[in-house]
Image (spheres, rainbow, N blue to C red):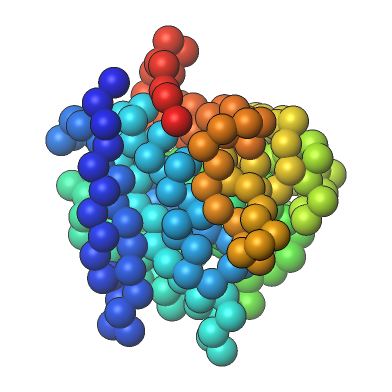
Amino acid sequence: MSTAVMDTVRYSSDGQLLDIHRAAAPDAPTVLLWHGRGPAERDVLGALAATVARLGATVIVPDWHPDAPDGGRPHLEASLRFTWDFVRDPAEIILVGWSLGGRAAMATALQPNPPEGWRPAAVVGIAARYNQPEPLLGLPSPMAVCATAPPLPIHLVHGTADRVCDFANAREFQAVLAACGRPAPLTELTTDHSGAVMAEYASELGRCRPAHSGSAHREGLRTARLIARAAGLPTQKAQVSG
């Protein structure tokens, strides 16, 4: 399988960076992947993004700053606009987020009045809470808008050993979606909060880092394959090395 190529570019007026993990095919689907609460942690998602790119999708991973006075939401909006300009058809973008980024991605995809009428082709929430609003995006919680959610594919991924965002959050959201006629498959991983995105917590760094071996890598590979499937790529027989 072809090795992905990564480019790093500035995407916002205040100089924020994003990584573009390019798939081999020029017409590959595009995934926009938002990291969680830690500021400027696009590197944490590096192993996951590179794996998805090797599976055939180009993956854009921006830094953003939840610790900023504005909560970093303008960075998310700027990364979205960058991705709109990057692709041939914005309607084909797959929006994915982890933890706080997962709630933001789900709220963005399901909001009643989407920006410029845009919605992603599919949305994937990884290890997130869905019962809290997005005040800085001016959006209600994803759970609050289930009844009016558009008929787009919704995918949930969560580790059963997650101690940061309990697995019950995903189960509850899945049940509410189903009750509103919006069934969403839930991929259960036997890993923790960081392992869901092919990462591990490094106590010596005080932050997460990509995992290239062990259970976090193995379970994160399941997340990568789910993202690839959400992007319309076949992954059943794909062999992906770390």
Residue at the image position 50 percent from the left and 63 percent from the top: 41
Comparing 207 with 26, the one in front is 207
Residue at the image position 41 percent from the left and 43 percent from the top: 49
Residue at the image position 63 percent from the left and 41 percent from the top: 196
Is 194 on the left-hand or right-hand side of 114?
Answer: right
Picture quarter with the N terminus: top left
Callout count: 0
- Where residue 163 sits in the image (x, y, percent)? 82, 51
* Location of residue 2 with respect to 10 vertically, above or below: above
Picture quarter with the C terminus: top left
- Where residue 4 sits in the image (x, y, percent)? 27, 37
Q: In the rendered image, is residue 135 in sight? A: yes
Instruction: Single out the residue that lies furthest toward the bottom.
Output: 69
Instruction: Single out the residue that lies furthest toward the front.
Output: 204
Residue at the image position 63 percent from the left and 47 percent from the top: 200
* Location of residue 33 with respect to 79 vertically, above or below: above
Q: In the rendered image, is residue 90 in sight? A: no
* Location of residue 209 with respect to 186 vertically, above or below: below
Instruction: Single out the residue that lies furthest toward the top.
Output: 237
Quadrant position of residue 81: bottom left
- Where residue 98 sits in the image (x, y, percent)? 58, 52
- Where residue 25 sits in the image (x, y, percent)? 19, 30
Quadrant position of residue 238: top left
Is 12 on the left-hand or right-hand side of 178?
Answer: left
